[in-house]
Amino acid sequence: MKRVLALVGIFLLFVLAACGNDGGEQEASGNESNSDSTEKTSISIWHNFAGDDLRAREVRDMIAQFQEEHPDIKVEEEAIPVDGYRQRISTVAAADELPDVFLTYPGSFTDEFQEGELVQPITPLLEEYPEWKEAFLPGALDVYDYDGEIYSAPVAMSSTSYLYYNKQLFEENNLEVPKTWDELMEVIDVFNEQDITPLAMGNQAPWVAQSTTFGAIADRVTGTEWFMNAVAQDGASFTDPIFIEALGYFKQLVDANAFQEGANSIDNTQAEQYFAQGNAAMMINGSWTISSLASSASEDTLANIGVTVVPSIEEGEGRANTITGGPGGGYLLNSKVEGTEKDAALELIYALSNAEAQKRIAESNSMVMYDVDIDKEKVSPLFYEAFNLVREVEFAPVYDLYLSAAAGEAINNGLQEIMLGGDPETVAEKLQKSQAQSIE
């Protein structure tokens, strides 16, 4: 009964919380060798590295390399676009048809699978390769630790709130990159006067505003401890004045015309290109933007982009020098996989997350939670700057990694509403109701 209820819960919660899917679904099949397929061990893997960015191509190349080096294993691969990935996984989970190995996200997404006994630990793999385990950065494995058993190893660092800025536009307008909220509002006014969009935003899939912008602002206002208490509904509520204040700061950006017109109608990739083309002076976005731009922008364009942290809020309760994020996604092992299939699946997970894989991912201009030295010549100057920056800051929580799925949907949709003129207090009430109901 526990498993059935969990399956139903995953379907109901995650299908609602799924990011908007605006481009249909693509599939990429794994390479097959010419050996007799009846002699092979067959395993399946799903992930969201379907794009043309450097990291996505690198991961697909690693899977192809694994297939080539293991002709006795048939790897059935599906690469699903990011915006539709959660919904696809939630749907097959509800039907008890999960692939053998699949990409997960830390927090509530993984919690559902673990609590429903739909996945099994990879602890034996970490015990087999202790030097691999020890090279993860502090706290990297904690998010996948359930009662002493490790269920995944991160292959990414989820750093979601860098402030990117166009160096030339700041120089031409005699402006300094803002370090405080007041300075940010001042440069927004100047760029608007010059008919330059201050902040690029592509919030068609509504997780963007929450994950990249609001979470960083809110943590500076409320502090992390308050947020975690509100998540647990322990002495804090999302209708508290301090959270209404945090929403108010986001509304200040909206009211100041910080974002381009129609920001809720374009996707994140379009916003990245809008910024890279010099149409916006700034953009608050995650580390994935670095990989995306590295595969699409010229060297001159990349050299003209700087990166820093979101400005501080002096009146706030939180820390100033933070970036929202922490350990990123990793691979989960289906609880039904046994025998030779399990051995093959664990071998694939290791191949995609071992020291060599972490270095390859990092050198594809993507952040990792792993102690790795990268060749400066193999990455863009923008990535190298961000790579060093993130090692000098602390992490703040990404909201939808800790909120329930329903509450995550409430804040995502609520921020879209605020961008269309909605009321912060109404958004707070919906968020509070959703989170309270989820832990009853």
Image (cartoon, rainbow, N blue to C red):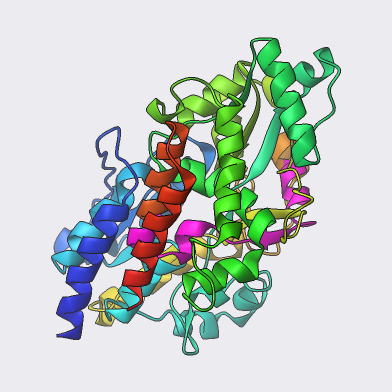
Residue at horizontal 33%, vertical 65%? Answer: 101
Residue 439 seen: yes
Look at the image and tell me in which quarter the N terminus lies: bottom left
Residue at horizontal 45%, vertical 38%? Answer: 418
Count of residue discs: 0
Q: In this picture, is 145 found above or below 356?
A: below
Q: In this picture, is 206 found above or below 388?
A: above
Residue at horizontal 42%, vertical 37%? Answer: 422
Q: Position of residue 37 (x, y in %)?
A: 17, 59
> Residue farthest to the bottom?
147
Residue nearer the viewer, 315 or 147: 315
Look at the image and tell me in which quarter the C terminus lies: bottom left
Q: Position of residue 92 (x, y in %)?
A: 19, 60
Residue 306 seen: no
Does residue 219 show up magenta in the picture?
no
Does residue 402 show up magenta in the picture?
yes
Residue nearer the viewer, 16 or 46: 16
Residue 436 shown left or right of residue 215 in the figure: left
Could you say which quadrant of the image residue 415 lies in? top left
Residue at horizontal 53%, vertical 71%? Answer: 236
Q: Position of residue 238 (x, y in %)?
A: 49, 62
Q: In this picture, is 7 found above or below 384?
A: below
What's the magenta region? Answer: 384-408
Residue 32 shown left or right of residue 434 in the figure: left
Q: Position of residue 69 (x, y in %)?
A: 41, 58
Residue 179 shown left or right of residue 302 in the figure: right
